[in-house]
Image (cartoon, rainbow, N blue to C red):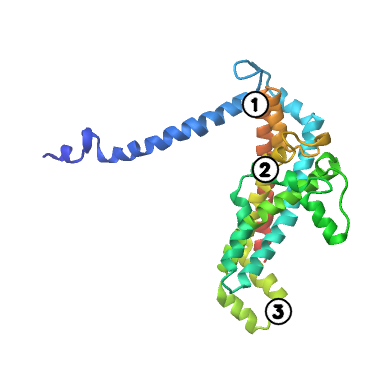
Amino acid sequence: MDRTTKARGWGGIRRQHWAYVFLLPYVVVTCTFFVYPFIQAIILAFHQTNGPSSRVFVGASNFAFVLTDDEFWIAVRNTTIYAVFSVFLQLPLSLGLALLLNTRKDKMKSFFRLILFSPRLVGQIFVGVIFTVIFVPRYGLFNRFLQTLIGWGLEERWLEDPALVMPALIITSLWMFVGFNMIYFLAALQNVDPNLVEAAQIDGAGPWNMFRHVIVPAIKPVATFVIVMSTIGSFQLFELPYSLLRGGFGPKNSGLTIVGYLYNSAFNSGDLGTGSAVGWILVLIIFVISLAQIRVSGTLRSEA
């Protein structure tokens, strides 16, 4: 067998070419389900459509329409409110639960971790359906809880009052996502260098100083990741309000999110071009906010 034959594999293909053969399925799948839709989304953003077959080039008119539409800014306001509460309510609760579980040494630790994480195992549609029952007026579980705790409950229909729709969404998301983010914080706490903790204890650091000067710097990279991912997830919110509000977005669009506005524009109105423009605006919003959060976190880390 000569040198040329040895350098070839099955079917006469050179050995170094087999890598490309094995990569081919990945390349085909990526091009079919990512590259092609990505390019089409860019093209659609500059067209007005009436269903998938009709397409007219309109330039930047879709973006101008979206940015001057009052309904879009209602969606931005609702999504921003939800995102702020996701960061400033969900994450401290998640960190608190992680600290609590990290200090427990009994055999029930795994059980509590599973119970707190389990709401994330079900989909947002299922959670939305469950909480429609919880928010039933007078006899709903949440009103029963209020009546037992403080002897008073709401008479109004939670999901028919514009002022109560956003609190209902926030309460529902707390139940679903607090345990999920807790897992990240718990993993970070378990990787804190025990030598640092021991040194701080020898120096007489109390619980607050231990948390501030040892725990927080150690878990800051994970905290940054959780904050950024929670913000991105909040701005992508759709299934939860859609199912909780039974296929709508509440009275006076009080539960309308940016992705909900995209859904109405692209599918209810049939204009995929406007929907694509909304999607790219959302990408820009998420990119700017995420970049700002990462920059701020990096600044704080360098100062520490």
In percent of width and height, residue 98 lies at 64, 65
Could you say which is closer to the camera, residue 101 or residue 27? Answer: 101
> Which one is earlier in the sequence, the residue at label 3 or at label 1?
1
Q: Nearer the viewer, mark 3 or mark 2?
A: 3
Q: Is residue 257 visible?
A: yes
- What residue did someone put label 1 on? 45
In percent of width and height, residue 284 lies at 67, 38
Q: Is residue 303 visible?
A: no
- Please tell me in which quadrant of the rendered image residue 300 appears: bottom right
Which amino acid does the dot numbered 3 rest on?
Gly
Which amino acid does the dot numbered 2 rest on?
Ile
Q: Residue furthest left?
A: 1
- What residue did someone put label 3 on? 206
Say what secondary structure mark 2 lies in.
Answer: helix
In percent of width and height, residue 211 lies at 68, 71
The residue that appears at 79% across and 45% down in the rendered structure is 136
Q: Nearer the viewer, mark 3 or mark 1?
A: 3
Q: Residues within 10 Å of mark 2 (few under 14, many from 20)?
A: some
Q: Residues within 10 Å of mark 1 (few under 14, many from 20)?
A: many
The residue that appears at 69% across and 46% down in the rendered structure is 130
- What residue did someone put label 2 on? 286
Give the distance between the C-alpha atoms of the residues marked 3 and 1, in whole angstroms.
57 Å
Relative to 2, does residue 195 appear above or below in the rendering?
Answer: below
41 on left or right of 90? left
Say what secondary structure mark 3 lies in.
Answer: loop
Q: Are marks 3 and 1 in contact (CB under 8 Å)?
A: no
Q: Residues within 10 Å of mark 3 (few under 14, many from 20)?
A: few
- Please tell me in which quadrant of the rendered image residue 103 appears: bottom right
Which amino acid does the dot numbered 1 rest on?
Ala
The residue that appears at 67% across and 26% down in the rendered structure is 267
> Which one is earlier in the sequence, the residue at label 3 or at label 2?
3
Relative to 257, does residue 60 appear above or below in the rendering?
Answer: above
